[in-house]
Image (cartoon, rainbow, N blue to C red):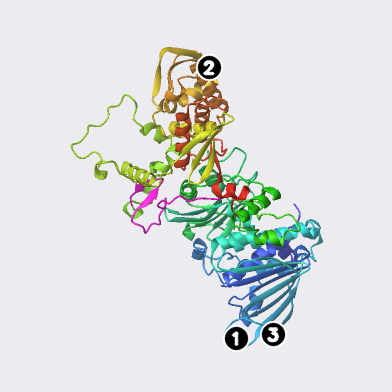
Amino acid sequence: MPKINLLDKSVYELIAAGEVIERPSSVIKELAENSVDAGARTITVEIKRGGIAYIRVSDDGCGIAYEDIPLAFQRHATSKVYSADDLDRINTLGFRGEALASVSAVSRVEIVTKRAEDKFGNLYRLEGGEPLEYDKAGCSNGTSIIIRDLFFNTPARLKFLKKDVTEGNYCAAVVEKLALSHPNVSFRFIRDGRQALITSGDGDYYGAVYAVFGKQFAAGLIPVDGIYRDISVTGYTSSPLFTRSNRSMQSFFVNGRSVKSPLCCAALEEAYRNSIMTGRFPACVLCVNLDPAQFDANISPSKTEVRFSNEKAVFDAIYVAVKNGLTGYDESREIELAPAPAVVAESVENTAAEKSGGKSEKYNEEKEGVSTLAVPSGHETVFKSASHEPLFKPQNAEQTTLSGVMLPKPAEKKPEETPLEELPGFAFLSQKSFEKRPKPTEEMPEKTEQDPLAPETLPHNAAGERAEKDRETSARREVRVIGELFKTYILCESEGSLMLIDKHAAHERINFERFRKGINSHGQMLLEPREVYLSPKEYDAVRGFSGKLADVGLLLKFSENGKVLVEGVPQYLDSAAPEDLLQSVARMLAQGGGSAKGELFDEVLHMMACKASIRANEDNDISELAYLADKVINDREIRYCPHGRPVLTQISKRQIEKYFGRIV
């Protein structure tokens, strides 16, 4: 065996630095996080050549005392942790005491710092971890650190860096993450002499998102705000109409720390299930705040991964908050009209002038050329939020409203005694929810002599549902069906807008909600049961879901040799061939054996809802179209088909009048 040697300090410091400092963006992350921990309200980050040649991080924080500066560059020296118990309740972004030591080991460092109570500032210079200068200096309050020639003494690491532009983009991403997680801090990012980003630092979270991602991204956001089991989730998530082909725009922050968490991604995407198309992903900027003792950030050198002590509670909190945001936010999609021809604008203006007895001033000014009407070049998506009570109130509120159902105050029941399955807004996630529904043969409870309409005689959930229905009735929109376009789209008028509704997508979503919630889904018994032969895999898969299939109206009887008798089908599918229906269900259940049960069964409901829906190019009575139109416009849940395609779009009266030149 080779002889064991103790590594020299210069060698093991380079190894340790390699674990923390991977590229220039790692330096910015460590230094800017230290600035945030120092209480800074203004942080400036400047880079040159992607941060390889030059990095400067300046702040107006508390500064460092003269005698503490050399110690700050020693490994495992920190002002944020004093004992082992402090590791269980970390409230700062940095805590290991390795950042400054790692940065100085692979670069040339200059730090100028001053505390408010000191008369003079301090200057300290190092090269490759070795001090070169230590003296007093004149400077403003706060700390400014300059990093030059990163990896100058480790050419192997320098060789693996990307192009300057790419490294600069990594640096920009780090500053953007910090700006999003700390809207109360003003961040300024300067890249090769140009200001690339600046945030106000006024605490406005939407303003920070707008500054980082721009107007187009911010316009398609839905606010998220909720508390569940002492876990707060706030921020913004994208509309189902604004999705992406990857997860690159999903940003999660835990107690102000940017993290990469598969758990958070799964909770977010679960809330969007049945609202976006397969293969598309929502964007978000979500801040999760919880007791520091409930998570561990000390599991990776970069501190971008966390481990939660109660993963289910965190999953549920994110799911609840995002689902409430989606449910409580109504949106409509406006069609973009091209500007009208200039000659039309001229004739309209001239006609108006002639009626008034003469030419208009604008016509006189532009008589040498063609008069044009000012028409906006495009229309952004308009989100209309219906007036309704918040679906999720803070814990200090008297009651919490969830999906229109009134729940008791959190203080009246311990969080661990309130399983997520009991929340009515999440019945479709719970396997028990299918078992709790009464079977068709069960007897209904006897009526009492009390007033059946009195809220106190109703179950608690029913009272909440009645209150929600009363609110919907008071804000109900009138709908007038005009006709049908291409035997596919319903044309209707409502509140000054022309609505176009995809009748198949709308009916499919309505049927899907009926099946999922068990509304009028009792089976229609067949006069003669139909026998279907299934393969062993299909037989086992269908038998495993037989209870849930019975709850939505597909009544089956199992015999030997892989034969299944179809005794009843859902009422909305009485026109479908029972054999084809069961074979389709069996094939889907057998192929999706590795999927989550809730997601797999939703796919079955998608298929059943599609088979039960009217289709394009079918002839439908005007009363059927009127029912669909009224259901879509007055039910916020009917905005997307189960596969995520939009159901409704519109053209406002103002857009039409602008197009025809009636208004300017």
Residue kind at label 3, given as amino acid type: Ala
Q: Quadrant of the C terminus?
A: bottom right
Residue 400 in magenta stretch = yes
Whether the residues at callouts 1 and 2 have beta carbons within 8 Å, the answer is: no
From the image, tell me which residue sits under label 2: 534
Image: magenta residue range? 382-408
Residue kind at label 2, given as amino acid type: Leu
Inter-mark Cα distance, 1 to 2: 84 Å
Residue sitting at x 56%, y 65%: 183
Camera sees residue 466: yes
Could you tell me how many numbered marks the image carries?
A: 3
Residue kind at label 1, given as amino acid type: Asp
Outermost left residue = 449
Picture quadrant of residue 455: top left
Instruction: Say left or right for 499 vs 173.
Output: left
From the image, tell me which residue sits under label 3: 137
Q: Tell me which label, 3 or 2, sits earlier in the chain.
A: 3
Outermost front residue = 357
Picture quadrant of residue 207: bottom right
- Mark 1, other Cα within 10 Å: few <14 / some 14–19 / many ≥20: few
Whether the residues at callouts 3 and 1 have beta carbons within 8 Å, the answer is: no
From the image, tell me which residue sits under label 1: 118
State whether the magenta stretch is mostly helix, strand or loop.
loop
Instruction: Say left or right for 236 vs 343.
Output: left
546 vs 79, nearest the viewer: 546
Measured as percent of width and height from the top left, residue 180 is found at 59, 61
Outermost top residue = 528
159 vs 190, nearest the viewer: 190
